[in-house]
Image: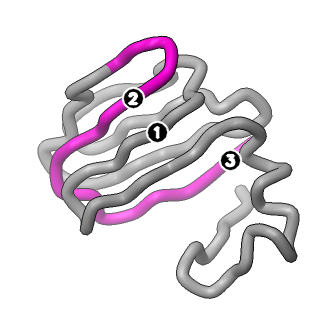
Amino acid sequence: MRRYDLRTQNPQKNGFSDVLGAAEITLTGNKRAIIDGAKGVVEYNPGCVRLNLGRLCLRFCGESLTIKTLSDDKTVVEGTILSMDFSS
């Protein structure tokens, strides 16, 4: 599993945008994540939401997680997000 610290790494310098492809992630505190470009849901339960981004999967772990919106262009995950990681 590959981890990225989004607070300290510059996406333009480390190839992070190349890894995510067309996906864009917007976090509002630790309560909401908006993911543009997710290709589907791999796992979904109140403690974990895992999304297919193409070459990677994006996993949110937390409490009371729900998918509020699921469409071709946007996925919205809400709840208490405690961690977020990527895997291939």
Look at the numbered discs 2 and 1 and tell me whether their residues touch, using CB distance below 8 Å: yes
Quadrant of residue 44 in the image?
Answer: top left
Task: Indicate the position of residue 7 as horizontal and vertical percent values.
Answer: 54, 82
Residue 86 magenta: yes
Q: How crowded is mark 3: few (under 14 residues within 10 Å), some or many (20 or more)?
A: few
Q: How far apart are marks 1 and 3 (CA)?
A: 16 Å
Magenta extent: 70-88
Q: How far apart are marks 2 and 3 (CA)?
A: 18 Å
Residue 10 magenta: no
Task: Indicate the position of residue 71 as horizontal and vertical percent values.
Answer: 40, 14
Q: Distance between the residues labelled 2 and 1?
A: 5 Å
30 left or right, relative to 61: left
Residue at the farthest bottom position? 8
Please state which amino acid type lies under the numbered disc 1. Answer: Ile
Q: Earlier in the sequence, mark 2 or mark 3?
A: 2
- Residue matched to label 2: 75
Foreground residue, 43 or 10?
10
Please state which amino acid type lies under the numbered disc 3. Answer: Ser
Q: Which of marks 2 and 1 is nearer the N terminus?
A: 1
Q: How crowded is mark 1: few (under 14 residues within 10 Å), some or many (20 or more)?
A: many
Task: Determine which of the numbered discs, if any, sits on residue 87 in the image.
Answer: 3
State whether residue 34 is above or below residue 13. Answer: above
Task: Please identify the quadrant where the N terminus is shown.
Answer: bottom right
Task: Determine which of the numbered discs, if any, sits on residue 35 in the image.
Answer: 1
Residue in view at x 26 percent, y 54 percent: 62
Residue in view at x 71 percent, y 39 percent: 56
Please state which amino acid type lies under the numbered disc 2. Answer: Thr
